[in-house]
Every structure is written in C-alpha cells, then in structure tokens.
Amino acid sequence: MTRSPSTRLFAALLLVSLAIFAQVSDALYFYLEGAEKKCFLEELPKETMVTGTYKAEQFSAVQNQWIVNPESRIQITVEELPQEHVVVNRQNEPSGRFTFTSAESGDHSICLSVVSTSWFDSTKTRMTFDMDFDDPAGDHHDHKETLSAMAMRIHELNQRVQDIRREQAFQREREAEFRDQSELTNSRVVWWTIMQIVVLGTICMWQMRHYKNFFVAKKLV
C-alpha cells in the first residue's frame, strides 16, 4: 500500500511538532494575578547547585501578544524548610536567572512573584520557569582530584620559593663574612705597612747616627 504525499507530509509535520514539544517541555509556565506568589517545593541533596531561569510576560492589548515589560520586577525568594532560613531574597529583572547552592539537604521553597506598586493591581503575568540541578556526587571526585593536584602543585612552588629564600639568605651571610674578612685583611695590611715604614725609618736614623759617630771618631769629618 503506497502512502500519498499529503500523508507523508502530515507525518513529517507531526514528528517535527513532537520534537519541538519534547525540547520545550522541560520548562513550564503559569499565570500570576497582580502580586500573587507561586512557590515550588524541591527536596535537594547537600551542596546541590540550582540554576533557575525565568521570563515574565504581560499581555499587551496594543500589540495583541505577550511581551516582556522592562519596568516590571520579579521577587525571588528561596528558603530552607522547616528552618525558614532565607537563601535568596532579591528583586530581579523580568527576564533572567538566579543561582544558589543548598547548604543542607532537605526541602527548599522556591517562590516567584511580581513586585506590585498598587494594592489593587490585577495585571496578569505569564511566567515561564525552568530549573537546572547540578548533582554534587557527579563531579565531586574530579573536583577533589583537581583540587588535590592544584594543592600539591602550590605546595611544591612554595617549597621552591622557600629554598630560594634560604639560598639567598645564605649567600647574603657569606657575602657579609667575606666583606668583614676583606676589611680586616685590608686593615692588617695597612697597619703592617705602617709598622714596616716606622721600622725602616728607625733603622735608617740609627745607621745615619752610627756612621756619623764612626766618622767623628776616625776624625774623617
């Protein structure tokens, strides 16, 4: 049985639609009325990094479509339960992401809301939200090995620096000893030279006096 071209085209379109839906099905979207808050409860292991991506859109009657209002602000709150310890509490732009790491294992409340400037604000907001979880057990061993290798390398470099410093200190001590020895030797040479001059002068004077007395005694002068 041969399929018609229209049937094959319909099957191809169906497959493309399913593929697109599979790609975008990870992210969810929901609607908020005014300052309504939407919270998600997630049980997280210890030291799990969570990255949340969001986009808040408001319906524009002029453009007849959902658009991002740059003047709106999104309140993001993350708490550890049941301690109610606040991990994240900030106001961000209408489209962006936030990241946090769980300090302890357990339930975490992740809440999103639109910051409203009016008590009776009924603006409808469509929020697209997605979360990505980084398993700490996946790369822990690799990170540990990398950190250990880096620590060993840093330790080796520190040892080399200490050796160089000790060698420089030893060379400075030897230079100081050599300088002191040279100064002492030079001073001794100077004093020895002075003593030789004094002795030679004394001998010359004695010889001259002796020859003078000899010549006088012989009546040669």
Image: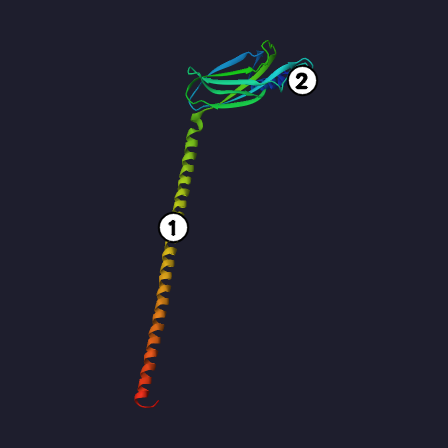
In space, the residues marked 1 and 2 are separated at their CA atoms by 89 Å
Mark 2 lies on a secondary structure that is helix
Residue 181 can be seen in this image: yes
Q: Which residue is mark 2?
A: 5
Q: Who is closer to the viewer here, 214 or 140? A: 214
Q: Amino acid at mark 1?
A: Ala
Q: Which residue is mark 1?
A: 169
Percent from the top left, x then y, of residue 217?
A: 30, 88
Q: Which numbered dot is residue 1? A: none
Percent from the top left, x then y, of residue 148?
A: 40, 35
Question: In this rendering, which labeled residue sits more in front, label 1 or label 2?
Answer: 1
Q: Is residue 16 left or right of residue 81?
A: right
Quarter of the image with the C terminus in it? bottom left
Q: Is residue 61 left or right of residue 180?
A: right
Q: Is residue 144 above or below residue 120?
A: below
The residue located at (38%, 61%) in the rendering is 183
The residue located at (52%, 23%) in the rendering is 98
User: Within 10 Å of the Cα at label 1, are there few (<14), some (14-19), or many (20+) other Cα atoms?
Assistant: few
